Amino acid sequence: MIYIILLSLIPVLHYVSNNVAKIHTYHEVFIISAVMALLGWLVALAYKKISRKDVIALAPAFAVGMLIFFKYDKFLLFFDFVRGFIVKPEILWVVCALGIVFLTYKLSNKRQYAHAFVKFFIIISFFYQSGVIVNDIFEEQNSNVVVKKRAINKANLDFKFVQKPNIYYILVDRYMRQDTLLELFKYDNSEFLKNLEELGFSVSRTAFSNYHFTLPSVAATMNMEYHKHDSVEKSALNSLNKGDNNVNKVLIKNGYKIIHMPSVWGDLACVDNADKCIYQCEKANVEIYRSFLDITPLKHFGFCYIEPKAILDTKSDFEGKPKFVFLHLAQVHDFICNGPVIDSFCGYISSVKMMNDKLKQTVTDLLKYDKNCIIVIQADHGVGNPSGDPFNATFNLSGFGKNIHRHWYGILSAVYVSPGIIGKDKLDQYFSGKFSLVNVFRMLFSTLSGKKAELLPDKSLLMYGPKGAQVIDISYFNKWGKK
């Protein structure tokens, strides 16, 4: 029975080892560990009572079931690619899960020689994950990279605004670019893009991100700089994403109030450097809900996602002062369709369609009362990284082909600049063309300051390995390194 309990705790250990940098309290981890251990004990007890067999015979099937359960999001992403929009992906997951678990049980429960191997595997896996956690905690506490309050780079980021419109930054996580949506999903979202253009947005069909997953991508965008890749720590990226970045520093220096509206994830959650923080509901601020259970079928129950229309609630905030509103939407990333509480796991394209309708209505309503503003709607990466935690991943580019740049880095980008803003034509021309995220705020802030923009070379970097030390510039795949 102890082996089943150890198996049930391995997903918790895996979660902790991947999130050491952002876990601020382990109370929730202890609670979920107790729940998982109790679940394992009850399953083992029920099996023993019903079958009257050695519980170790259940271990292989239980392990496979746990793997399928905690890779729910990965399975559904795969099914969403191949199902042809005939059968719901969650139905396919249930059928496959039951079939695979049953087959595993039938093949393994009568083979006594396999039981000793299963015991050995469980013990090694448990203690290996425990060792990884100890090592990660040690590295986190003794890292050579000390996260300090960063000063603005005086050489090219010292902006003094002569125009101070409200700025709304709407980050739609993992929203692919039009060409990628059409190629991978046979979905044409040109109507939505045309609707935005009719509202005055400049839409780019060639914009791309600088990194292929959220942590470094958003951090580089908000810091207006590429990372020093030989010394990148998750804690440093989290610090940048939670407000200790050059964008916020420039805005605060120019008298802006910062309003942060995070999604359900901890990576971009609120900390003390926002003037106001707005959550959809209290559960959105619970780490276990954000990062552990939302990759399982339990994501259907009780998890809150902030909605695009929530940005309208900032209308009366800090009247008389300019404000910067950062809204992070994770519904497309997580394939969510309906409402702030998950009630339909509907597939990537369905979530895109739903998000299109909500974004269109939200910006239409927003422009009714705040016409002299800037609205930026952008993704942080394309289809993204399929290999789990990039900090523990290795890549062989020969297996990806020339489309890796468009698929992983091609992003939605639409920028509205009020007609009353001096330099609008220059901004419209820039944001309707080919650019990367690291230069978004460089371009905006330079225009608002009435100075020439000092832009960085546009490039896309594949960052992976411990501390992000391995970096490959893949911009050349589609010759997008330069304009």
Image (cartoon, rainbow, N blue to C red):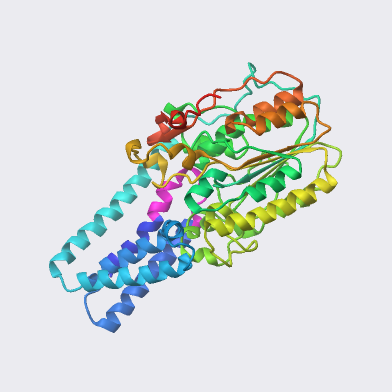
Q: Position of residue 171 (x, y in %)?
A: 62, 44
Q: Residue at x 64, y 23 (%)?
A: 152
Give the answer, above or below, for where 361 lies relative to 346. above
Foreground: 277 or 182? 182
Say left or right for 195 vs 412.
right
Placement of the C terminus among the 4 image quadrants:
top right
Q: Position of residue 355 (x, y in %)?
A: 64, 54
Give the answer, above or below, for where 337 lies relative to 365. below
Placement of the N terminus among the 4 image quadrants:
bottom left
Q: Residue at x 13, y 66 (%)?
A: 113
Q: Residue at x 71, y 51 (%)?
A: 360
Foreground: 1 or 217? 217
21 falls in the magenta region: yes
Identify the main secondary structure in magenta: helix
Give the quarter of the image for residue 272: top right
Q: Residue at x 69, y 20 (%)?
A: 158
In the image, which residues are magenta? 13-28
396 falls in the magenta region: no
Q: Residue furthest right?
A: 320
Say left or right for 130 vs 427.
left
Foreground: 335 or 278? 335
The answer to whether one can see residue 236 in this image is yes
Give the quarter of the image for residue 9: bottom left
The total number of labels drawn is 0
Q: Position of residue 215 (x, y in %)?
A: 51, 40
Give the answer, above or below, for where 243 lies relative to 270. above
